[in-house]
Structures are given as structure tokens and as C-alpha cells.
Amino acid sequence: MDLSHVRAVASLPVSDVQKATDWYRDHLGVAPSRSEEVGTEFSFGGGTSFFLYPSRFAGTNKATAMALNVEDFDGTIADLRARGVTFEEYDFDDLKTVDGVATNPDGTKSAWFKDPDGNIIGVGTM
């Protein structure tokens, strides 16, 4: 079976779908593309999307749940900050953020924020 042609969708568990939908709409500036009883989908470029669904396990993941690959990192970070997004600070052996931004050895930058349920969302240029 070849799955290389299927559409993959990130799924993020949340405690309250409507609250999370409002937060993502207001903080990322993206309108939901589909809402139904089981959750809400947000569509991005290239046929990519993510889906919010109710789960009692919301907020239990301690790793990056989804990454946003952007062309204008600095502009995107500034826009997200203006929308009220707070970026995480990390200090690991091979990763240290300064004002919420990590500069990678190749010069690219990365940053992470959490949604109200604690899902970690990465922003970077790949």
C-alpha cells in the first residue's frame, strides 16, 4: 500500500473545542474551514490542515504536536506576538531560546508556543 498520495492532517486534542477554535482563530488569524460535532478543522496552504477534537487527554503531550513552516519567520513571530501569543523559553544542551527564539546552527530560527490546552506548536523555516 502506498500512502504517499494521501492527505495527512495533524490532530490536536483539546478540552473544549469551541474555546480552542476561538483561540486559534484569534491568535493565528485563520478561520476554521470545517466545523462539525466531532471537532473543527483549520486549512493551510499546500492542502495541509489540523483538526481540533475533544479529548480527556488534552494537554498531556510534552513534545511538539504540530509545526508551522513559514517563509518570513521574523514577521510571523511579530504578528503572533501582536495577537497575544507567548513563546516558550527552553534551555537544553543543544537548544537555547532567547526571547522565545532559538537560532539553529545553520542560521534558521525556531520558536514554540502552547495553546490553552498545552499543545506545543512550533514555528520555523525549513
Image (cartoon, rainbow, N blue to C red):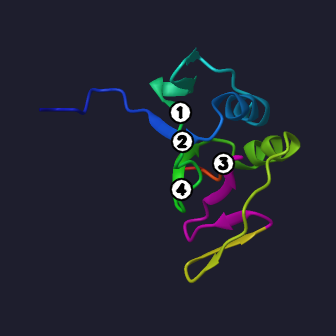
The correct choice, above or below, for 37 with respect to 79 in the image is above
Q: Are marks 3 and 2 in contact (CB under 8 Å)?
A: yes
Residue beneath label 2, please? 13
Asked if residue 48 lies left or right of residue 27, the reply is: left
Quick one: label 4 or label 1, which is nearer the N terminus?
1
Residue beneath label 4, please? 64
Quick one: label 3 or label 1, which is nearer the N terminus?
1
Residue 124 appears in the figure: no
How far apart marks 4 and 2 lie (CA) works out to 13 Å
Q: Is residue 31 magenta?
A: no
Could you tell me which secondary element the residue under label 3 belongs to?
loop
Q: Are marks 4 and 3 in contact (CB under 8 Å)?
A: no
Q: Nearer the viewer, mark 4 or mark 3?
A: 3
Q: Are marks 2 and 1 in contact (CB under 8 Å)?
A: yes
Residue beneath label 1, please? 53
Q: Nearer the viewer, mark 4 or mark 2?
A: 2
**Residue 10 location, x and y as percent?**
46, 38
Say which residue appears at 25% left-offset and 33% top-offset: 4
How far apart marks 3 and 2 lie (CA) works out to 8 Å
